[in-house]
Amino acid sequence: MTDHAARRAAVPPGAHRARNTLSGVLFGIGLAAFVDEVVFHQLLRWHHFYDRASTDVGLISDGLFHAFGWFAVVASLFLFADLRRRGALWWTRWVAGVLLGAGGFQLYDGLVQHKLMGLHQIRYEVDLLPYDLTWNLVAVVLVVTGAVLLVRTRAGGDAVRA
């Protein structure tokens, strides 16, 4: 048995739960930020991250937001690679983290940034209710699906190692 195979065999089911979840959450946050930035900020040009100033400030805020998303993805992939190297990657738990991260980010964006802080709206000069409901409902579905998957992994029964 090689050192790598021995290391993988030595990892008990359920080990590294938090790291699998954290890696997934960071990836989900970064993925949601990336999709938000590319689709709504760049392609549709519905808003900037910070719309309460000039277009230049909005573009700078978009760049910082985009960088934040990539930092989260890169950090998650370092954790992912380490988990895989240790033979401790738990796919279901990782995917649960991705869904929780993406949904949590989207819910935070929709409630805190759009409504509470007023940094920007999804769109301007339209009836916001259908946009807000869709945005936040999708976020809730992602969070609930991620939470269900996470609860299913608590027993440690489906630790699939890669």
Image (cartoon, helix red, strand yellow):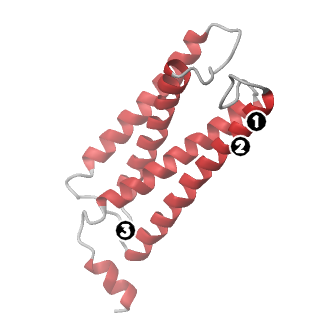
Above/below status of 74 relative to 112: below
Q: Residue at x 38, y 75 (%)?
A: 86
Q: Is residue 20 left or right of residue 60?
A: left
Q: Amino acid at mark 1?
A: Leu
In the rendered image, residue 155, in percent from the top left (x then y), is placed at 19, 54
Badge 3 element: loop
Q: Residue at x 79, y 28 (%)?
A: 55
Measured Cα–Cα span from mark 1 to mark 2: 6 Å
Above/below status of 160 relative to 125: below
Q: Amino acid at mark 2?
A: Gly
Badge 1 element: helix
Above/below status of 85 relative to 139: below
Callout in the foreground (1, 3): 1
Q: Are there few (<14), some (14-19), or many (20+) residues within 10 Å of tag 3?
A: some
Contact? badges 2 and 3 (CB < 8 Å):
no
Which residue carries the number 2 mark? 63
Q: Are there few (<14), some (14-19), or many (20+) residues within 10 Å of tag 2?
A: some
Badge 2 element: helix
Indicate which disc, 2 or 3, sits on the residue closer to the N terminus. 2
Q: Residue at x 56, y 47 (%)?
A: 30
Indicate which disc, 1 or 3, sits on the residue closer to the N terminus. 1
Which residue carries the number 1 mark? 59
Contact? badges 1 and 2 (CB < 8 Å):
yes
| Residue 161: mark | 3
The single residue placed furthest to the left in the displayed view is 155
The single residue placed furthest to the right in the displayed view is 56
